[in-house]
Image: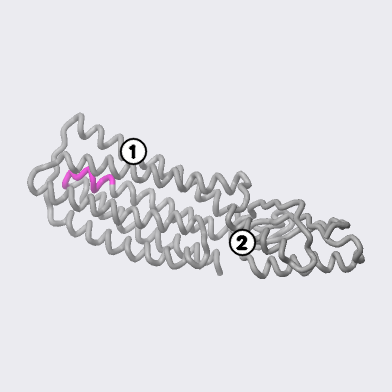
């Protein structure tokens, strides 16, 4: 269900951004608006990002198999990495065109159509943002988060484009180029954040410190556990693998010590949705 929701976010994003890209490019090229063309280029990158979300959600939804015993969840972060690369490429192209406009001269032709395109973009992106936010709150998916942030950024970007259209009425064209440069920088920064989040997971970054400390408190206070000698986590798609070594009373039987470990495993999986699987090693000790 979770990965189907992720794919649905990608599908709606592809449809919405395809529509916006077409009207932005047509109006931008016809009326010489660099900001609108940059906005259209941003929508083109958004189509790729939404398609990656669609594909990532589909692959991540595949169940465990003999070759992928912890599932296919890491596909989400791999595709999120692709999204960040597309944002870098888009930012470079927009920046290049804006600088060329400064060098060669640039004049925007005012049109009411540019206003209409901006308004359509803002309302479409607002819908996509609110829907993505709803799904992200349910799934905590990085792909959905990257789409949500992208939709939010697009609303802000189009508001600046709207301002450049207003200034074009007064034949002030330099703002149009400045907005294009601002859009490029905004996309670049967003791409860097998504790249960092994806890279951490793909490089087996450990569970965040706050959640890890809460788990340690839970384990240390668990009935029969006298301490923790090993606590390691490794990402497995949306969730983490937890490897534990715990101390138990050395005077109890082997059966009792393993019963403590079994109960602890069940309660950890029940309490923390971040955990996919738990491996617990029991160490008997004479200290209480």
Q: What's the residue at 41%, 41% (across, down)? A: 88
Q: Could you say where residue 188 lies in the image, as x and y percent from the top left?
A: 38, 42
Of residues 129 and 36, the one nearer the viewer is 129
User: Which of labels 1 and 2 is toward the front?
Assistant: 2
Q: Name, please, the residue furthest toward the top.
A: 103
Q: CA distance from mark 1 to mark 2?
A: 39 Å
- The image shows residue 123, relative to residue 175, as above or below, that is below
Instruction: From the image, tell me which residue sits under label 2.
Output: 274
Q: Is residue 64 left or right of residue 111?
A: right
The answer to if 67 sits in the magenta stretch is: no
Q: Are marks 1 and 2 in contact (CB under 8 Å)?
A: no
- The image shows residue 2, relative to residue 229, as above or below, that is below
Q: Could you say where residue 44 lies in the image, as x and y percent from the top left?
A: 36, 49
Instruction: From the image, tell me which residue sits under label 1.
Output: 93
Q: Which residues are magenta?
A: 31-38
Q: What's the residue at 20%, 53% (across, down)? A: 162
Of residues 223 and 113, the one nearer the viewer is 223
| Label 1 SS | helix
């Amino acid at each position: 269900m979770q990965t189907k929701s992720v794919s649905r976010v990608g599908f709606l994003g592809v449809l919405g951004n395809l529509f916006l890209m077409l009207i932005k490019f047509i109006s931008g090229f016809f009326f010489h608006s660099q900001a609108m063309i940059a906005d259209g280029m941003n929508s083109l990158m958004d189509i790729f990002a939404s398609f990656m979300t669609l594909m990532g959600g589909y692959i991540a939804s595949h169940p465990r198999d003999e070759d992928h015993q912890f599932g296919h969840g890491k596909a989400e972060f791999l595709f999120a990495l692709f999204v960040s690369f597309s944002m870098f490429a888009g930012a470079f192209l927009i920046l290049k065109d804006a600088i060329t406009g400064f060098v060669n001269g640039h004049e925007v032709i005012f049109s009411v159509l540019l206003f209409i395109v901006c308004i359509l973009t803002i309302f479409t992106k607002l819908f996509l943002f609110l829907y993505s936010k709803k799904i992200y709150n349910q799934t905590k998916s990085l792909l959905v988060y990257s789409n949500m942030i992208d939709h939010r950024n697009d609303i802000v970007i189009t508001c600046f484009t709207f301002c450049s259209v207003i200034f074009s009425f007064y034949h002030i064209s330099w703002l149009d180029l400045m907005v294009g440069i601002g859009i490029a920088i905004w996309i670049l920064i967003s791409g860097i954040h998504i790249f960092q989040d994806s890279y951490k997971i793909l490089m087996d970054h450990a569970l965040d410190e706050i959640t890890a400390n809460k788990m340690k408190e839970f384990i240390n206070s668990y009935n029969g556990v006298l301490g923790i000698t090993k606590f390691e986590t490794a990402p497995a798609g949306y969730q983490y693998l937890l490897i534990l070594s715990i101390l138990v009373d050395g005077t109890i039987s082997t059966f009792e010590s393993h019963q403590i470990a079994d109960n602890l495993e069940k309660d950890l999986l029940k309490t923390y949705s971040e955990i996919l699987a738990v491996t617990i090693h029991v160490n008997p000790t004479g200290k209480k």
